[in-house]
Image (cartoon, rainbow, N blue to C red):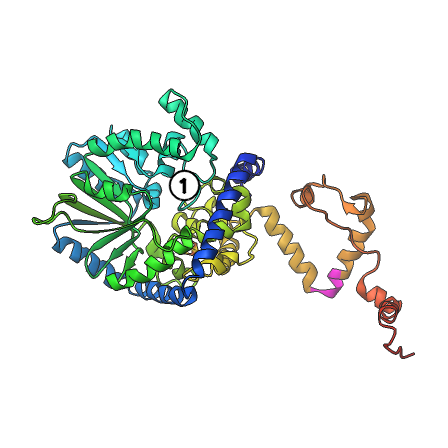
Amino acid sequence: MNKQFDERITHALTDDHLHHAVNIATDRLRTKKAQALTKIDFAQWSERGREIREHVISNLDYYLTQLASEVRRRGGHVYFCADTTDAVEAIQGVIQSHHATKVIKSKSMVTEELHLNDALEQMGVEVVETDLGEYIIQLAHETPSHIIAPAIHKGREQIADLFSQVANRKIASDTPSLNDYAHEVLRQKFIEAEIGITGCNFGIAETGTVCLFTNEGNGRMVTTLPPVHIAVMGMERVLPTLADLEVFMNILPRSATGQQLTSYVSLVTGPRAHDELDGAKEFHLIILDNQRSQSLGDPDFQEVLQCIRCGACLNVCPVYRQIGGHAYGSVYSGPIGAVLTPLLRDDPESAELPYASSLCGACYEACPVKIPLHDMLVKLRARNVSRGFTPPAERLAFQIYKKTFASPKNYRLAVRSLRSVQKWLMKNGEFHSSIPILSSWSKTRSLDGLSPLTFRERFAKGLVIDQITEKLPHVARKE
Ligand code: SF4
């Protein structure tokens, strides 16, 4: 494991605030989800959602072309961006063409992929996040630690301290006081903004509509108050028709926040028409590839593009619940992040993320579109081995393991050798935690020594039979 990843995990494991905040929040989300699922035949809706997403991803070229032509037909502008640089330049181009200096944003994970705020601030633009969680982490100069709850790692006291610092006065830590402060600051930002930037939960190919699920109303304000709206979407976030949206209105909020319906579902179809009273006068849609197309047609990983970013897999993941989101060191954390990040970045550092999993399969059980994340994690580990991304010591260890277990003679020799030296390596019946090659395992877990006799030796001496007849006296012993 690389040192930085190891350090981030160690740091997270010793952060009691983080454990407390993440466990309380994920428990609450899981409980609410469980309650919300009982109100409908969720399995049926979920299966329909999976079918739609599978169909879209298998025909992505067709639906993306349809989406783009519908947006253009309604007077919008579309930019297909191969990578993050292309996307940032496209957004900067729109901002520059308006000589704009004030931008407001609603929550968008794909703009986190672009590191958009930094890029815009470097060109002298003031960017303000208007989702409360995103606003908190922007003030704290942090990144989101959960797909749908970016400030999940922070408790109310920590948020109150942060707001008090920025406001230069005491802000109480109760929810109404925190909300009031955010409203007070953000209201003015909404009024002054020249450009609004949003993500896109789904782009509807049939109508060229961008759909946003929000709970604070900020998404609607970002899309209607500033004269220019830029929506940014990953290329996979397409649905064929408006009728399909009904399925995802049923499964996304239930899986994400345990709500039967999100407070606001905003549908933006191109710029404001002549007979409309509100909406941006200009509409731009940025469609980002950023390595997503590499997974298209790949039988091992194509299904990951079916993800609807509900975050349910994070809430049930025993690893995420221990280390939170920042330890992953990537925009997307938890099981989906451990699969998606190596596919999007394809570098040795991200290649370590698939090991941040116990492979228990809870993520698959929780996923509303049934993405086999646990299988993909194993396949990514196998890919690492075939690419030589594993450390030399690990490769050597597995070569020795293979040679030992491939031959009964080698196996017996290895067992005899280890048994003859283990007494110097053990303390109180366990391997010593200071043995270098074993220490990363044995410092937190017990590693028992080898039994004095192998099963074959015990069998040859009649000890196995003795044990059986002792426990099962009715079993007759043949002499
Ligand atoms: S992988 Fe499934 S559970 Fe995880 S965020 Fe995506 S849709 Fe939700």
Task: Please give the range of residues in magenta.
Answer: 407-411
Relative image position of residue 241 (x, y in whole percent):
24, 63
Relative image position of residue 184 (x, y in whole percent):
30, 29
Question: Is 436 left or right of 219, judged from the image as shown?
Answer: right
Image quarter for ligand 1: bottom left
Which of the two residues, 424 or 301, is positioned nearer the viewer here? 301
Which of the two residues, 398 or 178, is positioned nearer the viewer here? 178
Quarter-wise, where is residue 238 in the image?
Answer: bottom left
Amino acid type, label 1: Pro
**Quick check: can you spot residue 302?**
yes
Residue furthest left as drawn: 274
Which of the two residues, 403 or 38, is positioned nearer the viewer here? 38
Magenta-drawn stretch contains 410: yes
Residue underneath mark 1: 150
Under circle 1, the secondary element is: loop
Q: Residue at x 29, y 54 (%)?
A: 202
- Above-or-below relation of 330 to 256: above
